[in-house]
Image (spheres, rainbow, N blue to C red):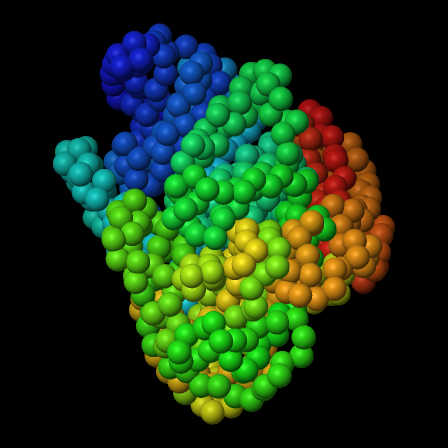
Amino acid sequence: MGVLLGLLATVPASGAATVEEAHRVGMSDGVTLRATVKGEAPLTRRPTIVEFTPYGRFGGTGADVPGFNRLTVEIRGTGDSDGVFDALGPRTQQDVEETLRWACGQPWSDGKLGLYGFSASAITVYNSLHRRLPCVGAAVLGSGTHELYRDLLVPGGISNLVPGAGVIAGIGIPALAQGLDRLLRNPLSAVTTIVGLAGAGITELTRPHLDDWWRERGMRGNANAFPILMLDGFFDVESRGAFQAFQELRGTGARLVVGGGHDQPPAGTDAGRAQRADWYRHFLRGQDNGVERRPKVELLLADGDRQAYVGGRFVRHDATDWPVPGTRWSTLRLDAAPSGSGPLIGDGSLGLGAPRRTGSQAYAALPSILTATDPPNAAVLGGVGDAVTGALPVLRDMNLHEQLGRSYTTPPLREDVLAAGPAALKVRLGTSSPGSGIWAVISDVSPDGVAHAMAAGRLNTNYPEVDPDRSLRDPRTGTVVQPYGRFDRPSPATQGRERDYQVEFWPIGNRFRAGHRIRLTVVGASLGSPLSPPGIHTLDVGASSLQFPALPGSDLSHALGGPRTPADAAPGAGAASARPRIRVQASPRRLRVGRSVRLRVRVRSTTTACRGRVRVRVLGRRVRTDRRGRASLRVRPRRAGRASVVVGATGCRTGRATLRVRR
């Protein structure tokens, strides 16, 4: 149900007159949301791009495309929408489905909807994909999270307060600005808005562990088949999310473009705007503009320095998948022997061979300045932050902060190395302060000795466990290169006792030039995570190593003075593209709306390449299989069209069986 509130006509600078309609859209629980539709005058039936925003009436993040209408929906409990803000949880996800159904039947809609989102509005869509979203033909999502806990607010089990506080402020200020309208319309709704925002603000502090509340605010499968264009940046504050979502959704036509998000696109590029418009024109209007023939993965890599990247110096690399097929992870071992190029205090070496000197090394895990050691949070500060650190390089470069930790540096590279992919640090460590953070930084060290942070990994010492089934492994060796930490059950460290940890680095994307060095630094947690207590960490050098990714065509072994690695010395290195597909059978394949039927599913083959638990979803529902890969369940389809049985497992491509549902 929707109520028309008013009309507004405008003539922008372009000369094309536009008109807006404000509506109140009723949800099934009686709450009404404010929605504003905008389009070229007169407002007629057109494909409509929909965005769900928590940032109020003017919080749309800019997806206007000529010839399309634009609908901005204010999420419940934000802006001028009633209800309690549930931090993009189950009730908001249901609102998404109900609002799309309403929009599909409006006189200004031709029944073809596109979704758009950036950051919070993208998270809203990712969180809602397990629901059947009616009339949607395509989506474009910038940044966003695959799991809100891991990808933004508590990465590595360490509270990330800077972006969390920024989000709450960004939601609260527009809500206050629209407070008078709310009071005049529905005085009681002001109370629920305050309660919802206050509750969301303290949730991060009161829920440090990954529980069901957090799981409900992550992607829980996909019940839809529309293609998604994902826009991201290697330095984005939500960088991990799009990479993970692409791996789950590539079977439905997803594309990944890594060229800037919160972290600013390089000068001379458009952050994917042109491709975004082409995406909608192709999938919602049927225009043959070549967008489907573009590479599935497009990467803009840094070239040694994030600020130089923003200034327009980058390296382009296209691929067919992520991680890039043929990526070779090398084990770089920590060495207590000084490199001679590191900081005066805590200098060590990093290399492919056995360490020359081992033993335990201690360092003080004191808070570090985020502009140097925390690339995602530094990048989100934008031009203002870059202006400050440009004037005061000591705030940006790693050299000062390395004095407080331990650094391990390679010899100068003999040739360029393109690095793109997740990285992982395996470290044996003891701490005097349980709950303190392990904070690791990979830097590009230029010939003049200046170290620029390119990627960061973080882990709370209370969480040493890893889920082996969901961790990404090198297809050549089986070594974990992207650990999937267990944050649901803390295991506090015992003071003075060392144990093994696996620290995940968010994807790195950089060209390490010949003459440059690769440096790993362990320091105290960033000031962007002030709840991580300081302590003294003791690191066992001989039991610690870094898994470092190099793209096809780059040879890290040769770059470090070793023999050239033969191209055929990596069986399965191309497994990222040549992974076997899981075979799945479902019976019956033809169903009827409203008729209950027992559906039988069988996973026919997983091969030895598929590792860990097989994950099965039937019509969006997660289903358990027996030891023979079989499942049986009753289903009652609610809509005509196509439905899917989707099967996934680590190391294999997703398998899919399509069901046809008739009336």
Q: Going 45% across and 90% down the picture, which residue do you hit?
A: 495
Residue 321, compared with residue 367, is above or below; it is: above
480 or 648, nearer to the observer: 480
620 or 452, nearer to the observer: 452
Q: Going 41% across and 10% down the picture, which residue do you hit?
A: 44
Residue 396, compared with residue 600, is above or below; it is: below
596 or 139, nearer to the observer: 139
Q: Position of residue 356 (x, y in %)?
A: 62, 83
414 or 417, nearer to the observer: 414
Residue 522, compared with residue 24, is above or below; it is: below
Instruction: Name the quarter where the N terminus is drawn.
Output: top left
In this view of the protein, can residue 637 be seen by the observer? no
Q: Position of residue 178 (x, y in %)?
A: 19, 36
Instruction: Name the quarter where the C terminus is drawn.
Output: top right
Residue situated furthest bottom in the rendering = 496
Q: Going 33% across and 72% down the picture, which residue do you hit?
A: 367
Residue 549, compared with residue 657, is above or below; it is: below
Q: Is residue 637 left or right of residue 206?
A: right
Q: Position of residue 357 (x, y in %)?
A: 59, 86
Q: Is residue 242 left or right of residue 387?
A: right
| Tally of numbered tags | 0
Q: Position of residue 231 (x, y in %)?
A: 50, 39
In this view of the protein, can residue 526 be seen by the observer? yes
